[in-house]
Amino acid sequence: MAEYAWPAAEKRRLIGTRVNRLDGPEKSTGAARYSRDVKRPGMLYAKLLSCPHAHARITRLDVSAAEAIGGVATVKVIQGVGTEIQWAHDEIVAVAAETEEIARDAVRAIQVEYEVLPHFVDWPDLATAPDAKPGEEETAGDADAAMAAAEVRSKGRYGLATITHCCLETHGQTSEWRGDELTVWASTQAVAGVPGQIAEAVGVPAANVRCITPHMGGGFGSKFGPDRWGVVCAELARETGRPVKLFLERDQDQAVAGARPGFEAEIELGASMGGDIEAWISSSWGSGGPAGAGAPPLPYVWKFPNQKVKHTSVASHTGPARAWRAPNHPQACFLTMAAIEDLAAELGMDPLDLVLKNIGKTGPLAPVYEAELSKAAELIGWRAAWHRRGEGSGTVRRGLGLSLHTWGGRGHASNCEVVIYPDGLAEARIASQDLGVGTRTTIGLVLAETLGIGLHDVKVSLGDSRWPASGASGGSTTVGGVSSSTRRAAANALEKLLAQVAPYLDAQPDQLEAADGTIRVRSAPERSLTFEQAAAKLGVHPVTATGAQPGPTNLIDSGVGGVQMADVSVDVETGVVRVNRVVAVQDCGLVVNLKMAESQVYGAVIMGIAYSFGEERVFDPGTGRLLNPNMEFYKLPGIGDVGEIVVHMMTGPGYDERGVIGLGEPPVISPGAALANAVANAVGVRVPHLPMTPERILAALQKGGVA
Ligand code: MOS
């Protein structure tokens, strides 16, 4: 019976070390072909006509002028006369042409008229919302009585703007038919899931559709399905009998292909003089487009003895919400941790002490948080550098802030096939995808570790739906899923190899082990073959074996905690913030590749800095249009805005035994809260809305009377 458990600490050669990306050279030299780079012989280019209005009915549509343009292959109406459009930039017509330029010209030549209908995009003003759905009030204890009896109370209004995913590679795919078989090169988080969805939409068996995605440029939760434009692309290709490439233009991508809902909340907290938090009352509302927005998990991380939580979902005529890296957690975290920091200021307490005093109310993760708070405080020098809110003078003022977060991250269902070739190379095949986090390297590392060989002796084939299916990359489930299925498939393949080579070593298969690039007798390691010599005994037939997650033994777990602390300097005359340092302390069970794990956290903190200070979808209430659907006025940080990021992974005894847990989402949850609390600590007043632009910081200073 093959051994599936993760190797004990002293036996790990690669797991937990810092391993470079297998595809690093390919990516950094530009050789890697992303979905958007795909070019097929005879390929047509498709472009979309978007609706300019936030809410309108199509009254006239005439595509004849577009069809008449030379080089236009076909024009396809997606939403015809009579259709009511619910958000600006919604797609109306698709054109496929010989070049991108001709396709754009053809889109401009389409004549379309609308009856413009009343729109609503200004959702933070709840009072004017025409479609607001209050949810059930959730209560514990008696929040009103506990609040009234509390020795100290703190009340505030907080909010976050709607933001978008801003994937560097926009959404789209290239489609090519051969007879009734379709191949799509899609930019997707779900290589194994896309074929079935497209097949159903275009009316062919799922087996006839293949999805290929060797490299893709970011998804963050916005690329799970083929989308309507993906189906349209396949239809254009079928209609023209030619490959068709359809990727959204940047403005379309920013407007329709993903939004993280924005939220507003009024939050009141009640505590004893000593800082025992007894009561929480919150009323929140938010919008993520026509479907409104589900409730953020408030209060985040904590459960107080008395709480009353109410949420209202507000519909708006804005591009619809999609899952955004840890859906609703960053928002809930900011709302909660800002309110707790404000309570600490009211109590005259160091927020670290307030958090520690109430840490038991976070539940089973409390000991993890305690250890992480202690580590983070040490790394940022909290005890030496923290001061009371607003203590400080001069133009540039420094402050510290902190936050906690949690996430599940249990590995998804995954299948893997491992092939050991007679030349000694081992291949893992898996219909997973690498969103940029290093999935390929994770799989290769586990394969090499299990077979006792080097990383240069493994090949990883992913990003192709013809390999065994693995789940979508969502919910931080990929590394748990693929590392487990790869571990089992590799162990099963090794078992077969050992059975074949045992006679050559005069041993029974179960007396053999794979280690240090050899197959050897465990009790007499000098009796060995190199892995290559062993593989050569296979003759002409490779060994193949499969493995799956879930499987017979448990290699994964879920439930992590993280702590982040931020150190900022704020210029109180300009409102400009400089991020001095962010410390991120995170657990994720057994770390497969320390370098990539740290890289995940760096990326998440950078993304957090982006939504804390820059990112915001700005809608014009008058026209209902998105004013910044571009990379110029939709603000992302440059490297100079990021500051120093210190990452500390909690590993070793107490963490490793849990097995592998996903890491993609948790570290993006806390930055907004930690940075906003640091800004409040620096300038002496709460800047209640993210992103904390210079305007908002100066407005808060003015309102707070801080000179
Ligand atoms: Mo994620 S937001 O589950 O890709």
Image (spheres, rainbow, N blue to C red):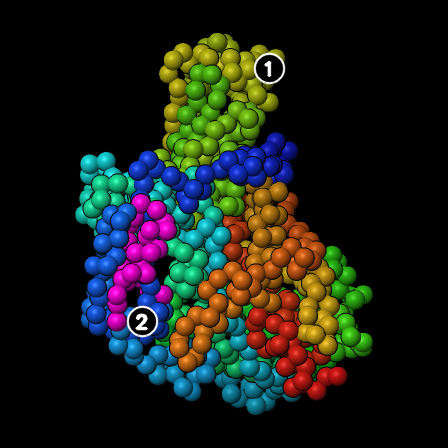
From what the image shows, is residue 229 above or below residue 679?
above
> Residue at left 65%, top 55%?
639
Residue type at mark 1: give it: Ala
Quadrant holding the N terminus:
top left
Rendering coords of residue 5 (x, y %): 50, 36
Q: Can you say whether 404 is above or below 412 in the image? A: below
Q: Amino acid at mark 2?
A: Gln
**Residue 492: percent from the left, percent from the top?**
42, 28
Badge 2: few (under 14), some or many (20 or more) residues near its Cα, within 10 Å?
many
Kindly identify the residue that appears in the image at 55 percent across and 15 percent down.
530
Which percent across, then down, holds residue 660?
52, 45
Q: Residue at x 56, y 18 (%)?
A: 518
Q: Is mark 1 within 8 Å of ligand 1?
A: no
**Residue at image point 53% right, 35% down:** 26
Say which element carries label 2: loop
- Between 159 and 171, the residue placed more toward the observer is 171
Q: Quadrant of residue 287?
A: bottom left
Please rate how many residues cluster around mark 1, counting C-alpha atoms within 10 Å: few if below 14, some from 14 to 19, many from 20: few
Q: Nearer the viewer, residue 452 or 674?
A: 674
The magenta segment: 89-113
User: How many marks can you see?
Assistant: 2
Quadrant in which the C terminus is drawn: bottom right
Cα gap from disc 2 to disc 1, whole angstroms:
73 Å
SS at mark 1?
A: strand
Residue under numbered circle 2: 86
- Magenta region includes residue 219: no
Q: Identify the mark nearer the N-term, 2 or 1.
A: 2
Comparing 28 with 94, the one in front is: 94
Residue 524 is marked as: 1
Residue that lies at the very extreme toward the bottom in this rendered image: 148
Q: Is residue 608 left or right of residue 344?
A: left
